Image (spheres, rainbow, N blue to C red):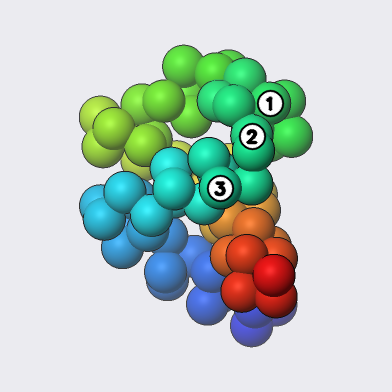
């Protein structure tokens, strides 16, 4: 639970700085691939990354957890 809370707290900074998109791209994921993992539309991922919209509720939790995993994987490599 704490990891999810930490990931959610980090989410706005990741989105505003462009780090969320960088993590996705560094992991070799396209917007549609990321969207499939999150069960959202590719347009939703693009809007989040561009700062047009923010993920809410369950989508925010899933997105934050996935970005946290991508960051951990990147740090380990």
Q: Which quarter shows the N terminus?
A: bottom right
Q: Secondary structure at mark 1?
A: helix
Residue 48, position as x, y percentages in the image: 38, 35
**How many residues crowd mark 3 within 10 Å: few (<14), some (14–19), many (20+)?**
few
* Residue lying at 58% horizontally and 56% vertically, measured from the top left: 67
* Residue lying at 31% horizontally and 49% vertically, measured from the top left: 18
- Vertical side of 72 occupied by 45: above or below: above
- CB atoms of marks 1 and 3 within 8 Å: no
**How many residues crowd mark 2 within 10 Å: few (<14), some (14–19), many (20+)?**
few
Q: Which residue is mark 2?
A: 29
Could one spot residue 32 in this view of the protein? yes
Q: Secondary structure at mark 2?
A: loop
Could one spot residue 57 in this view of the protein? no
* Residue lying at 36% horizontally and 26% vertically, measured from the top left: 47
The quadrant in which residue 24 appears is: top right
Q: Which residue is mark 3?
A: 26
**How many residues crowd mark 1 within 10 Å: few (<14), some (14–19), many (20+)?**
some
The quadrant in which residue 35 appears is: top right
Residue 43, position as x, y percentages in the image: 46, 16
Query: Which one is in front in this view, the residue at disc 1 or the one at disc 3?
Result: 3
Q: CA distance from mark 1 to mark 2?
A: 6 Å
Q: Which residue is mark 1?
A: 33
**Residue pushed farthest bottom?**
2
- CB atoms of marks 1 and 2 within 8 Å: yes
């Amino acid at each position: 639970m704490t990891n999810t809370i930490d990931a959610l707290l980090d989410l706005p900074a990741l989105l505003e700085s462009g780090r969320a998109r960088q993590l996705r791209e560094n992991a070799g994921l396209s917007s549609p691939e990321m969207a499939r993992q999150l069960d959202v539309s590719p347009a939703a991922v693009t809007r989040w990354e561009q700062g047009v919209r923010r993920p809410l509720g369950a989508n925010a939790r899933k997105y934050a957890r996935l970005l946290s995993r991508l960051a951990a994987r990147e740090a380990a490599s």
